[in-house]
Image (cartoon, rainbow, N blue to C red):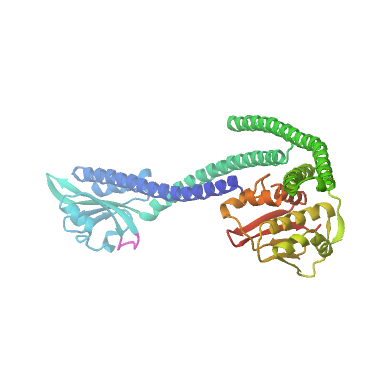
Amino acid sequence: MSAVNQISKQFLLIFSVFFLLSVVFFSDLIYQKSKKNYSELLNIVNNTVGVIFQNDKIDHDNFIENYAKSENITDNKIRISVIDSSGKVIYDSQIKTDKLDNHINRTEIAAALKGKSNTLVRKSNSVNKKLLFTASPIYKNHKIIGVVRSSVELNAIILENIKLTVCVILFLLVFSIIIICILKHFNNDINKSINKINKSFKKLSSGTNTVLELNNSSELAELSANFNNLTKQITELTEEVKTGEKQKKDFIINISHELKTPLTAIYGFIETLEDELNENKNSLSSETINNCQEYINIIKRHTNRLVAIVQDLLLLSEMESSDLPLVKTETNIKQLIYGLLPIFSQRLEEKGLQLKIEFQNNFDTMSVDVFTFEQIFINLIDNAVKYSDKGTIYITAKADDNFAYFSIKDEGIGIKKELTDRLFERFYTVDKSRSRNTGGTGLGLSIVKHIVLRYNGTISVQSELGEGSEFIVKLPKK
């Protein structure tokens, strides 16, 4: 789920809660407002009837009867009652007085007879319904002679409340639909923009130049401009890096080729010196012969190291070049690895090391470029022999449907965990003195890494200082 959709759902949830709370709030507000309006109307009715009773020249019952039939009273279904000071109902606009009992104990009547106008909601014993009552004392010559009480059914107030609430709900629904439509349009607009941004980033990450155009709003237009500016800078930087890499590779290749000629000449002269030394043994003292042979050996060792470095540099440059395709053929991996063992047999014997090979899951063949595949194992086995003085070197291989897994594990000196990340750097060696003595160039693991990457595989290392190291190579089977 996209972030925009998540935000939209959260907004709709919040809006729904707001909508429900609004309905409840407005419904209660309308009810309270209607109740107040009816209370005020009932007070007006009471005041009018009270004035009528203060005038002896008017036929009270006839006047009240006509007043009760007026449009304002009838439309609002207001009931008017007049009660004397003894609690007897002497007039009622809806019920015959002889059917009504004494009201002296009614809450609103008792309060009004004490001179307190009051409004309350209670169930009427006469009509068996909840009514809103307003009772006011009737004065004559500053003396309470009775009570006028007006009332209206609570259902009438609720019905009015429902009508107004429905109007509010309809308004809120229309408002909600408008908001949802706006939100949907905004959501679609943002999703389209995000999809464009994602596609542009994918193109950019794959090395394809792209231009992002977002004109939805000033903010997105600014984002588009910033993205395009970033793309331009990355493109320029990438070109600079490519140019620098190419120059570096060209330099390494050129310098390596240039070094090969003088190194070959030096090596040839060393062999010539050795031959002349052997031919003139009789005319030279043993001390001179030994000294000359020692110097020749030193020159030969360093020359061999330089030759190895040049060869590895050329090989590394070749492995780093993505233009050269891997020529894969179906190969018996077990036979290939066993075929490499004679290269290391003398060194294994000299150091007293054992080498064990184990293939699991009936894994025998896979499609590989033989030369580069051999380079992986030559360098990893050479590394294991170089940094082991005892124990066994284990080579294991297994495969599933998609990948082949190779492990080269030794019981040698191992390395600190914090140094494992640097193992695949060019010319990096854990033990420099050992590397010089064994003729290591510091390029073997870097070569292995680049070969593995060309196979779209991975290489990792696990090591403990003094406990040995294990290199794990994972390659696609196809």
Specify whether residue 99 is painted magenta: no
Q: Residue at x 67, y 44 (%)?
A: 427
Between 230 and 338, the one nearer to me in the picture: 338
Provide the major secondary structure of the magenta segment. Answer: loop
**Is residue 23 found left or right of 437 in the rendered image?**
left
Residue 304 point in image, percent of width and height: 76, 46
Residue 126 falls within the magenta-colored stretch: yes
Query: Image height check: is 457 above or below 312?
Result: below
Quadrant in the rendering for residue 264: top right
Image coordinates of residue 393 in percent, x first then y, are 70, 64
Q: Which residues are magenta?
A: 124-129
Quadrant occupied by the C terminus: bottom right
Residue 339 lies, with reference to residue 271, above or below; the image says below
The residue nearer to you, when weighing 168 against 328, is: 328
Residue 95, image x and y in percent? 32, 58
Residue at screen point 73% across, 38% down:
207
